[in-house]
Amino acid sequence: MNLILYILIFIIGTLFGSFYTLSVHRIPKRQDIVHTHSYCPNCNHKLGFLDLIPVLSYIFLGGKCRYCKEKIRPRYLILELLSGILFLGMALVMNLKIETLTIAKITEYCFMVLYLTFIILIAGIDKENRKIDKLVSAYGIVISIMYMLYLYIVGQTNIYRYGIYLVTYIIVLIFDTITLKKYAKNSYAIGILLMIITMVIFTNEYVTVNAIIYTLLSILLYILITKIVQNKKRKKSQEPITNQLSIGFYLGLFNVLMLTLVLFIMNYKRI
């Protein structure tokens, strides 16, 4: 029975992966992600049901559009597979089994899915556009408040700790509003700060701090390698290297990796 459950979770993960690829493409363009039918970005032909089956459609169509024969970027297949694996892996490290299924367990997993959706969208959009999207940040704040209310209702934690983060949200948002009104621009730094607050609420301070440390180390390594390459080619970029880095992408990546590792260790100790 557990095998059937895990297969189902993997399939659901691939479906979410398909949604993520669509959202990462459409959200920055402010296109509808719910009602507008999926279409080929090359020929704009509406895609049918057989064209939208995660993983399988890509394989059976040979990685090409059924209508214009244009090659489909492999990232669609990769993200769908990784999303399925991530959903399955998270279920395993959270010890989600038929015999252990409870309303509380299912609720915690659903919150984790909502959080993973936030992280993947933030990281994906940042990787493509180097931008922390405000709509996705707002989604993160909403699910964070929902999660804090849930924790308060079930009485599993000290609500005052999360109250501090809620106040921090408010302060940052007020500052962001003032900055936006004064300078009429989107602050990347404020977007990163809101992302970090959401990360702390869902994955605790330990996981978040480690994610930040590994992100900083990755940035330093990237800057070092870039400078070495530029010096060899005797070419310097007009734009600062830090402005080329998708910090949100690396934060999201290391946050998920650290969270998975910590949950795995905790589950292993219980065994």
Image: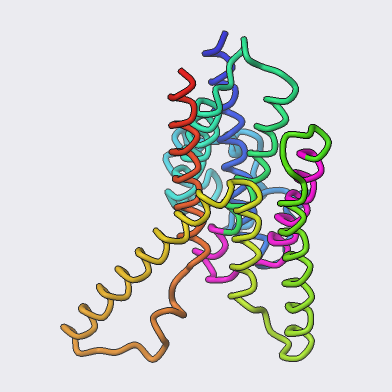
User: What residue do we see at 16% from left, 83% from top?
Assistant: 232
Q: Residue at x 43, y 79 (%)?
A: 242
Q: Is residue 65 magenta?
A: no
Magenta-colored segment: predominant secondary structure = helix
Query: If the image is split into quadrants, where does the N terminus sit?
Result: top right
Residue 42 seen in the current view:
no
Q: In the rendered image, which quarter is residue 49 located in? A: top right
Tell me, yes or no, if residue 102 can be seen here: yes
Question: Residue reaching furthest left?
Answer: 232
Q: Residue at x 60, y 38 (%)?
A: 52
The vertical placement of 131 against 55, above or below, is: below
Q: Quadrant of residue 157?
A: top right
In depth, the one of 195 and 73 nearer the eye is 195
Indicate left or right for 27 with 241 as reference.
right
Where is residue 130 drawn, in percent x and y? 53, 71
Q: Quadrant of the C terminus?
A: top left
**Residue range (magenta):** 123-151
Q: How does the figure colour the protein chain or chains?
A: rainbow
Q: Residue 249 in the image: x percent, y percent?
A: 49, 60
> From what the image shows, is residue 217 above or below residue 239?
above
Q: Is residue 169 left or right of residue 122?
A: right
